[in-house]
């Protein structure tokens, strides 16, 4: 089941996240949920979220 972030406003393009099976995290764009799906590990997803929260991203 896809989940949208609570930070995403209504009608905006957001990333939807799902955990369809143990050890898998899937991501897709809300504007085109039937389009491309990126699959990654829970550890890699957690690292990305942590990096974004800590503001360690470069422009």
Image: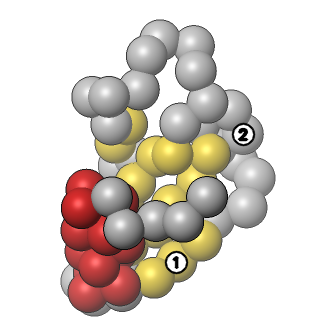
Task: Choose between 45 and 50: the one closer to the eye.
Answer: 50
Which label is found at residue 56? none
Residue 37 spot, x, y in % from top left: 63, 65
Q: Is residue 57 above or below residue 30?
A: below
Q: Is residue 23 above or below residue 32?
A: below
Check the image and tell me how it is coloured. Answer: secondary structure
Work out which quarter of the rendered image holds the C terminus and state it. bottom right
Label 1 CA crowd tier, 10 Å (few <14, some 14–19, many 20+): some
- Res 30 quadrant in image: top right
The residue positioned 72% from the left and 39% from the top of the image is 32
Q: Is residue 16 above or below residue 18?
A: above
The residue positioned 58% from the left and 21% from the top of the image is 12
Residue bearing mark 1: 39
Answer with mark 2 or mark 1, whichever residue precedes in sequence: 2
Decide if residue 28 is in sight here: yes
Residue 44 spot, x, y in % from top left: 35, 84
Q: Secondary structure at mark 1?
A: strand
Going by the image, does 26 lie left or right of 47?
right
Q: How many marks?
A: 2
Task: Choose between 29 and 54: the one closer to the eye.
Answer: 54
Going by the image, does 50 lie left or right of 14?
left
The residue positioned 43% from the left and 16% from the top of the image is 9
- Res 43 quadrant in image: bottom left
Residue 3 spot, x, y in % from top left: 34, 42
Residue 41 spot, x, y in % from top left: 36, 86
Q: Secondary structure at mark 2?
A: loop
Residue bearing mark 2: 32
Q: Is residue 49 above or below residue 31?
A: below
The residue positioned 51% from the left and 45% from the top of the image is 15
Label 2 CA crowd tier, 10 Å (few <14, some 14–19, many 20+): few
C-alpha separation, residue under disc 2 versus residue under disc 1: 16 Å
Task: Choose between 1 and 3: the one closer to the eye.
Answer: 3
């Amino acid at each position: 089941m896809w989940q949208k972030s609570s930070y995403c406003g209504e009608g905006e393009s957001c990333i939807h996240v799902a955990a369809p099976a143990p050890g898998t995290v899937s991501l897709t764009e809300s504007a085109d949920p039937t389009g491309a799906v990126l699959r990654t590990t829970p550890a890699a997803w957690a690292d990305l979220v942590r990096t974004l929260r800590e503001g360690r991203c470069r422009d």
